[in-house]
Image (cartoon, rainbow, N blue to C red):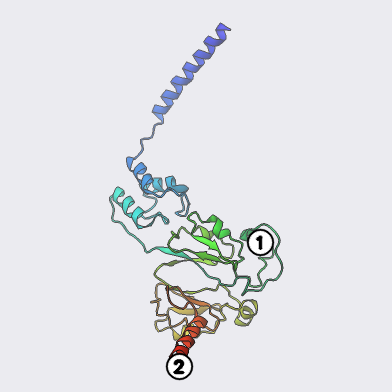
Amino acid sequence: MLSAIIGLGILGLIFGISLSLASKKFFVKLDPREEAVLKALPGTNCGACGFPGCAGLARAIIKGEAAANGCTSGGAEVIKNVSRIMGVEAVVKEKEVAVIMCKGGRKEAMDRFRYIGVHDCKAAAMIAGGNKACAYGCLGLGTCERVCPFDAIKMDDNYLPVVDEEKCTGCTLCAVNCPKVIIKMIPISNKIHIRCNSLDKGAVTRKNCTVGCIACRKCEKVCPIGAITVENNLAVINPLKCDNCRKCVPVCPTDTIENYFGGEPRYASLMEEEAENVQRIAVSK
């Protein structure tokens, strides 16, 4: 018994000395800036930057493998703090927010079949592309809501995701997890959106969804600066050109184009209703 105890003691001593020597031999001196950068990052570990969590991004920034503004979810303050630590000029990009490029919920869009399965868009999309008649439309099962780490997306009563622009950090997790690729990251200053993703011809789109783009080109023709083009049967706004003039909104016959300026009618039919109300009030006076 005594010899066994002595033997274990000697082995423990040998292992201890070995670990001590190994720790000195393989010691890697950490750049103190890495810890500072890590503390400056939001700590959400969302992975939207393309690196494994905030620690991975901090390490990449120190090594020069990522820019000081590499964090997509931290906002301007994080970028400024990281840039100050790195001794570089802060390059703050305009905040981008998620925009749902589909407004065909259960009220507007037709179904091909009844889906009974896992309440997840990816799972539903694996069954013949999903139950929606429009192959490009939102499946409405809330995967984007569940993956958002900032509680910025909620599903409404029409089974469509609604984005809270104040909470949205532009992390892109909702976009990369959408099997229909209907979520786009758009500069927050751009308030006019064509909320459709269908590449079907107009007649097919109209049959499948009452609010889909039918490629009538009215918006393209009325845009004074050429910010709208119809590509593959779908009107597309170039956010870098659009100046939010709103001229495209009232001419859209299917209410596909929406105005996100608060306090203003959101789409064409609402504009018509407001105009009729104003006229009715004027006549009554």
Which image quadrant for residue 264?
A: bottom left
Give percent across and percent down for residue 183.
52, 65
**Foreground of the two, 277 or 113:** 277
Query: Badge 1, how many Cα within 10 Å: few under 14, some, many 20+?
Result: many
In the figure, is residue 255 to the left or right of 97?
right
Res. 241 image quadrant: bottom left
Q: Is residue 152 above or below residue 254?
A: above
In the picture, the disc for residue 283 is 2
Could you tell me the amino acid type at mark 2?
Answer: Val
Q: Going 47% across and 63% down the picture, which residue do you hit?
A: 164
Residue 132 percent coordinates (x, y): 65, 69
Nearer to us: label 1 or label 2: 2
Quarter in which the C terminus is drawn: bottom left
For the residues labelled 1 and 2, say whether their Cβ atoms are less than 8 Å apart: no
Residue sitting at 33 percent across and 40 percent down?
A: 32
- Left or right, 10 with respect to 74, comes to right
